Image (tube, grey):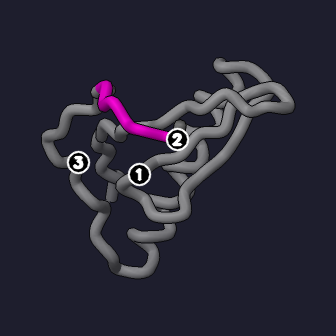
Amino acid sequence: MATKKRVMDFTVVFEKDNSGGYIVSIPILPGCMTQGETFEEAEAMAKDAIKGYCESLIKHGEPIPEEREEFVGKISVPISVGK
């Protein structure tokens, strides 16, 4: 029997690391994080981490979380921080 494949989209957050490279987190997959020295390496590591995480969920009979419709953005808020 052939294995079914499904392409899924995941929101990922790339943060520049102070010591160089990037740290990547996948918010919908709790604890799923990785890093890479370049953006391209971090992206490849994130794909590998997502695949491994999802394979573990499947192995343990758990569902892969579905992304929700969301918007990530920035807002500016004036805050008094002292005199």
| Real-space CA distance between mark 3 and mark 1, rounded to the nearest whole angstrom | 10 Å
Q: Helix, strand, or loop for circle 1?
A: loop
In this rendering, which labeled residue sits more in front, label 3 or label 1? Answer: 1
Identify the amino acid type marked 2.
Gly
* In this rendering, position of residue 53 left or right of residue 27: right
- For the N terminus, the quadrant is bottom left
* On screen, residue 4 above or below 30: above
Question: Looking at the image, do the residues carrying marks 2 and 3 touch, with CB atoms under 8 Å apart?
Answer: no
Which residue is under mark 3? Answer: 67
Determine the CA span between mark 2 and mark 3: 40 Å
Q: Single out the mark in the foreground, 2 or 3.
A: 2
Task: Residue at the far left: name it.
Answer: 69
Alpha-carbon span between mark 2 and mark 1: 34 Å
**SS under mark 3:** loop
In the rendered structure, which disc, 2 or 3, sits on the residue that comes first in sequence? 3
Sequence-earlier tag: 3 or 1? 1
- 37 part of magenta stretch: no
Residue type beneath disc 1: Pro
User: For the residue labelled by badge 2, is the local secondary structure a helix, a strand or a loop?
Assistant: loop
The residue pinned by badge 1 equals: 27
Taking the spot 31% from the left edge, 25% from the top edge, the residue there is 76
Mark 2 Cα within 10 Å, few/some/many (few <14, many 20+)? Answer: few
Place of residue 52 in the rendered image (x, y in percent of width and height, measured from the top left): 56, 56
Q: Nearer the viewer, residue 35 or 54?
A: 35
The residue beneath circle 2 is 82
Span colored in magenta: 76-82
Residue 47 shown left or right of residue 23 in the figure: left
Residue in front for this viewpoint, 37 or 18 = 18
Q: Magenta residues: mostly which secondary structure?
A: loop
